[in-house]
Image (cartoon, grey):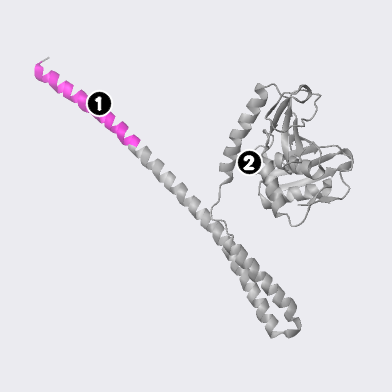
Amino acid sequence: MSTNDFESNNHTETETADDGNGDATTRREQAAARAELLAEENRRLRAEYARARQSQYRRTAIGLVAIGLVAIATGIAFPGSREVLVALGATGLFGGLLTYYLTPGQFVAASVGERVYAAWAENGAAIASELGLRDERVYLPDDGSATARLYVPLHAAYEPPTDYGGPIVLEEDERGLVLTPTGATLFEELRRVLPGDLASAATPLAAQLCDGLVEQFELAGSADADVDPADGRVTVAISDSAFGAVDRFDHPIGSFVAVGLAVGLERPVTLEVDPGDERADWLVTCRFDAQTADDGAAIDG
């Protein structure tokens, strides 16, 4: 082979290598451009969703104001019904202004909250497993903070701890974990917005908690309670959980129900979660001492 032929072949191989590197670089640039486009589209969709939700609230506010103005105008035109109509109009105006100015400015997707909770669930379950703790999840009322604590015992026969300092309890009959449950702050928020007192009887209390799950926090599409006060049991049928599988460690839905029952009934509550049937996705069952569990009393909210 001549020197010219060798140089020609070498030049051809170099061009081929350059073409391969160039193709790889082009593909990476294209992939990066597509990723940027997708990220931009995702931001745009989130912004549009937030604007749509804000528009919905503001349309509701405008409707309430319109009803209030019509009621007041009608009250002026018909003196015989003026008092009722003016009161209705004032209510509409107040509700409209309140809705408008309290319109949320930022919305967090349920998937984001679920991912945040998933890390807590994984860590909590791993810690309990590493310490050899049992599968029981016991929610204990904490009189000092008007909420409850999650207790995970070591022994089958245990005494609920009296010191909630935790998180690790070393007393022989009380050994285990004492944690702040995910449902604690949710329950505190429910008490803050309740129009009346928090019930201390199982049946009305379960109804308040189910309303909170669906209407206040939108953690579930539906929540229907089956209450047996004589047996010390409340079972809530859950469908369309916003935070995925409900049988994970201290899931917000089960935690919220158990915390609410523990505080409202002023006694320990044991939580069990099972897959549902054709009527519901999950069955959240809370068990407690049945004594005076449905006496119809109430405590201050």
Position in image of residue 51 (x %, y %)? 51, 57
Q: Residue at x 12, y 19 (%)?
A: 5
Secondary structure under tag 2 reads: loop
Q: Amino acid at mark 1?
A: Ala
Quadrant assignment, res 55? bottom right
Secondary structure at numbered mark 1: helix
- Image quarter hosting the N terminus: top left
Q: Is residue 34 left or right of residue 285?
A: left
Q: Nearer the viewer, residue 273 or 292?
A: 292
Label 1 near label 2: C-beta < 8 Å? no
Label 2 neighbour load within 10 Å: few <14, some 14-19, many 20+: many
Q: Is residue 180 magenta?
A: no
Pick whichever of labels 2 and 1 is earlier in the sequence.
1
| Residue stretch in magenta | 2-28
Which percent across, then down, holds residue 212? 71, 50
Which residue is disc 2 drawn over?
Answer: 243
Q: Which kind of residue does numbered mark 2 sit on?
A: Phe
On the image, numbered disc 1 is attached to which residue? 17
Residue 242 is situated, as x and y percent measured from the top left of the image, at 63, 44
Residue at image position (89%, 48%) is 295
